Amino acid sequence: MYENLTVENVKSEIIGRMTSDIDTREGSVVNDMISATAYEIWKSYQALDAIIPIAYVDETSGEYIDKRCAEYGIVRKAGKKAAVILTLGGTAGTVIPKAKIFLTADGLAFITNEQVVLKEGITTVIATAEEIGEKYNVEAGTITKQFVNLSGLASVTNEAASGGTDAETDEALVARLYEYLQRPATSGNAHHYKQWALEVDGVGNAKVTPLWDGPGTIRVLIVGNNYEPVDSVIVNNCTDHIEENRPIGATVTVVSAKGLEINVKANITIESKVTMEAVQKAFKEALESYLSSIAFEAYTVVYNRVAYMLLDIDGVVDYTLLTINGGASNVVIGEEQVPILGTVVIA
């Protein structure tokens, strides 16, 4: 706001307001005093720039985002740890201690919640992820290693892990604050149900349909932080949270949106200064951003929009045979669907 204000500007303003014949030339006592004063005044003006993101918070406001949200009772979602059922096999009678660590091939750690015994050479146990985060929602059969090998324990495998969510980002928290301020929630209106849904870890957006199945019924369609379908743990957590807050008499159904996979293929001509790999990476990122932006907002993946995005990638000269889900036309998104990026193949 005061980027163009310099120490010399301030000094000149002060000297210009002096009406006496006092010596203000460089090196004079008065000039030295004015210079020091002008510098301190300049620092004060520069500090005023910090007030803007404090008074009008955005994703750059740092700790002041949480402070402003606290004024309205909005708390940053801390994220949750994933849980998983492990199946352990080995010598009958082997004791598997509580807090034993098992790993995926890429080093994600899961810690058992209790001590178990291989009574007939096999048992199951619940384990919790070492840290919070969606990356711990690993697929079935991926937890296969022990951090420290235990005699008598020969094998470990897992069902799919679920329930892991990332901590809320600054951008998402600011968006939730603006949602609260710009769409007032009162007496269990639609905005109220959306706010309750967004308070739950792992819920990135929600779509509320009043009178969904007749009077007194409400459906809340939810997606994750990356606008993807969510697992049953998050759906149940969201249901429980809304049930704790909803008005008496409402019948609420919370469901995850279904994912509509968007697969894109194209033949392209590129400049020599770029590589096909770099173009594919940039195009994929642009597509992901576009698909996230239209979730619950628009219900068509526009063919020409995708074509323009491809041509807008640095180094792309032209394209041929661009298809989306096998066709050269718009793709319609269902009312209960959100678009998720599938395969991106360019050559």
Image: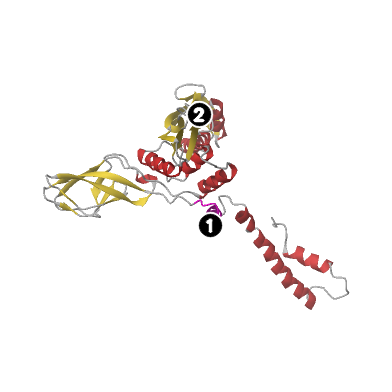
| In this view, 318 is above or below 197 | above
User: At which x and y percent is residue 237?
Assistant: 39, 43
SS class of the residue under badge 1?
helix
Residue 163 occupies quadrant: top left
Residue 39 x %, y %: 71, 68
Answer with the quarter of the image where residue 308 lies: top right
Q: Tell me if 68 is positioned left or right of 326 in this view.
A: right
Q: Which residue is mark 2?
A: 268
Q: Position of residue 165 (x, y in %)?
A: 40, 46
Q: Residue at x 59, y 43 (%)?
A: 182
Residue found 48% across the figure and 51% down from its top: 76
Secondary structure beneath dot 2 equals strand
Say if 52 sits above or below 276 in the image.
Answer: below
Is residue 65 shown in magenta?
Answer: yes
Magenta-tinted stretch: 64-74
The dominant secondary structure in magenta is helix
Type of residue at label 1? Glu
Q: Is residue 132 left or right of residue 155?
A: right
Q: CA distance from mark 2 to mark 1?
A: 45 Å
Depicted 227 relative to depicted 95: above or below = above
Quarter of the view holding residue 228: top left
Work out whether residue 323 can be spotted.
Answer: yes
Disc 1 residue crowd, few under 14, some 14–19, many 20+, Cα 10 Å: few
Identify the residue position indicated by label 1 in the image. Answer: 63
Q: Residue 171's spot in the image, x, y percent?
A: 53, 47
Residue drawn 52% across the image and 35% down it: 290
